[in-house]
Image: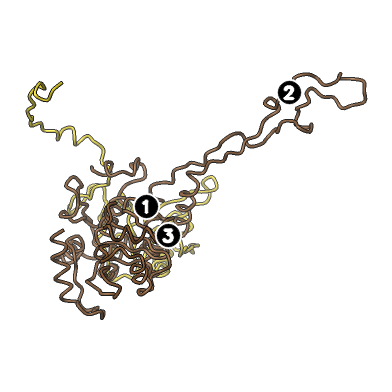
Amino acid sequence: MLVEELPAVEPVDVDWSHVERLLPRRTVPTPTDKVAYPSGWTPQRGNPSLPYSVRRSVNHMLPVYLRIMEDGVKRLTVVRNVRGDIWKLHDELKRHLEEANSRYIASRVNEVSLYVQFKGEYVQQVKDWLRERGL
Amino acid sequence: MTTKLHLLLRSASFVQQNLCQPASRKCLHRATQMVRLCSTQAGKVHDTAPAVPVAAAESYAPALLRPLTETVAPSAAAVRQVWVENMDSADERKLGLLELHPEVFAAFPKLHLIHDNVRWQRMYRQVDYAATKTRAEVRGGGRKPHPQKGGGRARAGSIRSPLWKGGGVSHGPRGPKTHFYMLSHSARVGGLCATLSVKLAQNDLHVVRDLELPSADPGRLQELVERRYWGPSVLFVDDTDEMPENLVRAADQVPHYSLLPVYGLNVFTMLKHDTLVLTVAAVERVQERLLRALSIHNSMAVKHTDASLLR
């Protein structure tokens, strides 16, 4: 078919926003700025006075996880992606947890994989402590 | 391009001598200036490690890519700086400073990720052609060689049983086998960031303004490399796959100088060559792509193409 025989084409203005909003995103978007979030989530504010920091996950969450092993008997609280002085963070956090729970807490520092581990279930306490410091 | 040249010329006249000027920190491009802008915004508190990658400059990003915004910019202490050098003469001249994002160029050197990437690059294309025949496939052996009883011999059903000489192999390698597997997206991205960080930390990463050589003489190129104490093997990385003609002609003569576009950057090649030489455009592109890749969740990472990063 010759180019001259092809039917005429005209551009049509279509509002695709209703389709685009349903398409999945490839990257995690930055959360909108708010004073307070209903879920209790707080964005990272940063704390330059501290010699350590903690990198948030891809979904902007604190990297504090509970590992349950040995069929529920062994519970470990892990803080991952610790930057800077990891031992300082470990010492301060351990002191805080031991005071708050009035017991000795076994812990471990891995400088190569950049995580700190506490024996027990202290995820919420650790998260609150990190949030207080803006990490 | 004109914007880039304009800023570079301004900084070149400012830093004309070969001496280092640590006090004069000049940002060359708007991409790097975005880092400055983020860090100087009032009310923002800085962290040593960013939560979300840095924004890509709108002027240098393709129109369809959305620039990412971050909640906390990297602190001035965390940001890495590198000299931009020249390639137009054997004498080294520092043309300016370029700022590098710490997430890409100052990542913790996770050796397990580097190893995983090197292993994956070697193994995914490996095909093992070893193959043996079973007793059913070996020629012959259909008839019972001798009666079950009498004769004093062990009972046998076929001359090609695995017990017999010339018989089939019971549990041998079976035909061509591929060792193809895909390393996870986060491992591949982490490996690239770790390798770039290692190269920068070990003074094996150099940034040049462009790869335009004055002549196509391989000797002159070798002299340039040796004068600056760049390693025996050098990998030149540019933004596009169409490289300047002089460099292509010169590097073609020297087997240990390789040319690579940014999209071909991989851990194995970076480790194979002693020195990495990137252009400013290549650094910007690598940074932009890796920062965007770091914000992709593993479950969303299906393909590693430009099209998949458009949204």
Which chain is rendered yellow in the image?
A: A
Nearer-N-terminus badge (2/1): 2
Q: Which residue is mark 1?
A: B189
Q: Nearer the viewer, residue A87 or B29?
A: B29
Say whether residue A135 is visible: no
Q: Position of residue B121 (x, y in %)?
A: 46, 49
- Where disc 1 sits, the SS reads helix
Crowdedness of circle 2 by 10 Å Cα count: few (<14), some, many (20+)? few
Q: Quadrant of residue A84?
A: bottom left
Say whether residue B181 is visible: yes
- A40 with respect to B172 (left or right): left
Amino acid type, residue under disc 3 in the picture: Pro
- Discs 2 and 1 share one subunit: yes
Name the disc covering residue B255, or none.
3
Quadrant in the picture for the C terminus of chain B: top left
Compared to residue B44, the image places residue B90 above or below, namely below
Q: Quadrant of residue A88?
A: bottom left
Q: Nearer the viewer, residue B184 or B162?
A: B162
